[in-house]
Amino acid sequence: MSVVTLQIGQCGNQVGGQLFAGLADDIHTKLSQTNLSQKANDNYVEGVLERFFTITDNPGQLPEARAVMVDMEPKAIAQTCLEAKKSGRWMYPPKQQFWQQRGSGNNWAHGFKVHGPAAEESIMGMVQKEAEKCDNLSGFMTFMSLAGGTGSGVGAYVTQCLKDEFPHAFLMNQVVWPYSLGEVIVQNYNAVLTLSQLYQSSDAVLIMENDQLHKICTQLLNIKKIGFKDINKVMCHKLMGIILPALSSSNPDIQRYNSLGDLLTHLVPSPDYKLLTVKSIPQMSDSSKDFSSFNWPGLVKHLRQMLIANAAMEEGIDWQVKLEDSRRSLANTLILRGKDLAGADTGPFSEPRLYPPWVPEDCRLAVYTQPRMFNNYEKCATLISNNKAPIYSLDSVIAKAWNMFSSRAYTHLYVKHGLTEEDFVDSFVTLEQVVMSYKNV
């Protein structure tokens, strides 16, 4: 079940490049560090390659990422392609890149109304070509930022085109939430406009918040001078925890893997609820891994409290937050990787009080396991949730954007590219309905 990725804008291309580099590192892990037999490891590697890479018939040819790269400026794409090829392990497919010489100027309308329509034919031609390489297409993943103009504006436009062109394929947008203190002055406009469009086109929106990722880099990884590459590594560790092959433990008699379709079918039970978040445990610097040991009861206990308290990391969890005060989940997917999986009791994530009473018992929790060790962790767990947590950040973005809009600050920059004030109002209304739906859970 292959997945085609779209890397849109500078942020999207950098995240995508980091993700494929991580996937390449994973399949080249030494056998002694995998906890698997040679045959089992070979089957796993074959599964990863089939999902995310194209193997050409040319002998010696590097695996090609199943990816389409889009930016309105060439620099990020050129740099990402160069780093891939220099790794000697993988590369991007040639002629699957679209760029121009002028960016979107942090203006969502410029990306959505101007660059997107102008580039549609070229981009969708590349997507079609990449999709035709797949024996069995599961769907699409896009990587994009909410703050700028290309990732948000062109990303939203391309998402709309994907849904029109491939109506039966699964579509997940991974979005990078801007820093709360601000990256660009109009980032809240861009975020509101993007999210309102994605909610109409995408099957799921997976949120990664820069503030939380930065906190992990500082407090858990002990990085002194944090750059985008450090943040992207944390982000991609979480993503790989979700998308690398794992087997469903719900029915041992049926071999069912965590395909994109299976993940989204479980996690998004209704089109009114599409916001997903991800938590990982443990998270630590490479130098600390050799001196740390973990057991499944401890990892499960901490991860469950991270869910209840909406904590981004295991350090400093508020244990005073009780289950009764938690943000209820519509659905959770738990993926366990590493040794001694038989000792992992996932029952605490099936606790009925974690979910609204109208969610059927068999729709609450999906569990997948993979005995192969991941990223040098003897044991690790990833939790993907559809719950109330994102609406608090969303509420804040909506409020900040509305304060600017009420005085019509900077709206002329959007209007000149074809966006109307009614379009702004429609976006606010759409997201207020999303917030209300989640608050009523």
Image: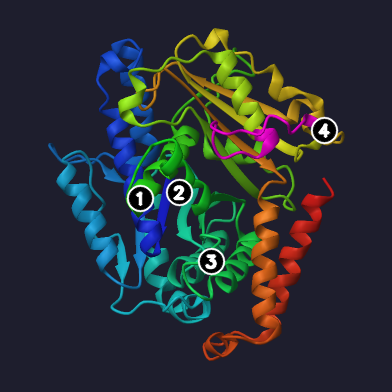
Q: Residue at x 81, y 26 (%)?
A: 352
Mark 3 to mark 4 CA distance (whole Å): 37 Å
Identity of the amino acid at label 1? Ile
Q: Residue at x 39, y 65 (%)?
A: 9
Classified by dominant secondary structure, the portion drawn in magenta counts as loop
Kindly report which numbered mark, 1 or 3, lies closer to the viewer in this rendering.
1
Mark 1 to mark 2 CA distance (whole Å): 8 Å
Counting residues from the start of the chain, the first of labels 1 and 2 encountered is 2
- Badge 1 crowding class, 10 Å Cα cut-off, few under 14, some 14 to 19, many 20 or more, is few
Mark 1 to mark 3 CA distance (whole Å): 29 Å
Counting residues from the start of the chain, the first of labels 4 and 1 encountered is 1
Residue range in magenta is 307-323
Residue 393 at least partly seen: yes
Q: Are marks 1 and 2 in contact (CB under 8 Å)?
A: yes
Kindly report which numbered mark, 4 or 1, lies closer to the viewer in this rendering.
1
Mark 4 to mark 2 CA distance (whole Å): 29 Å
Residue occupied by mark 3: 156
- Badge 3 crowding class, 10 Å Cα cut-off, few under 14, some 14 to 19, many 20 or more, is many
Which quadrant does the C terminus fall into? Answer: top right
